Image (spheres, grey):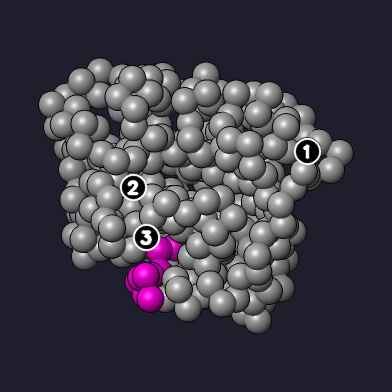
Amino acid sequence: MSKRILVIGGAHIDRRARISTATVPGASNPGRWFTEPGGGGFNAAQNLARLGHAVTLISPRGGDQAGEMVADAAERAGIDDRPLTFLDRQTPSYTAILEKDGNLVIGIADMELYSLFSTRRLSMRQIRDAITAADLILTDGNMPAETIIALADVAAKRGIPLAAIAISPAKVVRFRSALPHLHMLFMNEAEAEAIAETRPDDPSGWPDLLRGQGLRGAVITRGKNALVAFRDDMACALAPPALPEIADVTGAGDAFASGVIAATLDGERLPQSLRAGAAAAVITLQSPLAAAENMSRATLDAALALVPEPRLLA
């Protein structure tokens, strides 16, 4: 059944350069550039719309060609796009350098415009109405800390589940004061360590450590190693399926979040929600795009055959 999802987060331009040979640091490397609309919130919004949900997207954008590219991509994905447009500003961008195998060498984020999404923007009528209509709200670490806190407070008072994508170790700390109000925080191990300011000796210790920070639910991805996740009193580990070839790692984490959210809204418990997230990530890893255009309920169901059952943690 279709649910109404409000995404308040990053929607900008992703520029990726992929090196064609073995990476040589400090030297010129042959490769190719690729540009597409992206951002954690935007990638997830596209995936969720393609999975059949009614998605509204609100994000700051500049009055430039890059902003128009984002708007066009949102329309093609079936998203109800409601940007906060600053005509005299430049749309944010993320530039990444990837190795031949698709793994990240370094990324540069030009995200200054997002700082203008202040708490008072949440009082705008179009945003208030969108919040009221939502079955779930998804945000990301591109938003200012004070805005995240205010959004979490509004969602909690209205009884609307709030999920979040960490984005980076530097940005995940913006969620620290809002952790008790988050239903699920999606992050990698470096981001989890930034929140907890430590890491457990064994990965199975992440649930207890992060519950101690006030979190009710989280997914901690660990690259090729088994991810760890918990929601309320349940915790699981899931080994990511081995793939013969990866087209691009960009957007895989956002896709994982999308799959988990979609399955959770369908009423699935944590183990099957994690399998749906892993299946969505598989689809994205096999696509050259950060949000795979072939994402759908049918392709997600097919990809589930590649995903093992999660292991319950004590």
Q: What element carries label 1?
A: helix
Give the x, y percent position of residue 241.
Answer: 66, 70
In space, the residues marked 2 and 3 are separated at their CA atoms by: 13 Å
Mark toward the start of the polypeptide (1 vs 3): 3
Q: Locate residue 269, reporting x and y percent.
A: 52, 51
Mark closer to the observer (2, 3): 3
- Label 3 SS: helix
From the viewer's side, name the closer residue of 288 and 132.
Answer: 132
Q: Which of the two residues, 244 or 111, is positioned nearer the viewer here? A: 244
| Mark 1 vs 2, N-terminal side | 2
- Residue 282's image quarter? bottom right
Q: Name the residue under label 2.
A: 11
273 to 50, vertically: above or below: above
**Disc 1: which residue:** 205
Query: What residue is pinned by disc 3?
Result: 47
Which span is picked out in magenta? 290-298
Quarter-of-image position of residue 37: bottom left
Identify the residue at horizontal 13%, vertical 26% (top origin): 125
Label 1 CA crowd tier, 10 Å (few <14, some 14–19, many 20+): few
Is 193 magenta? The answer is no
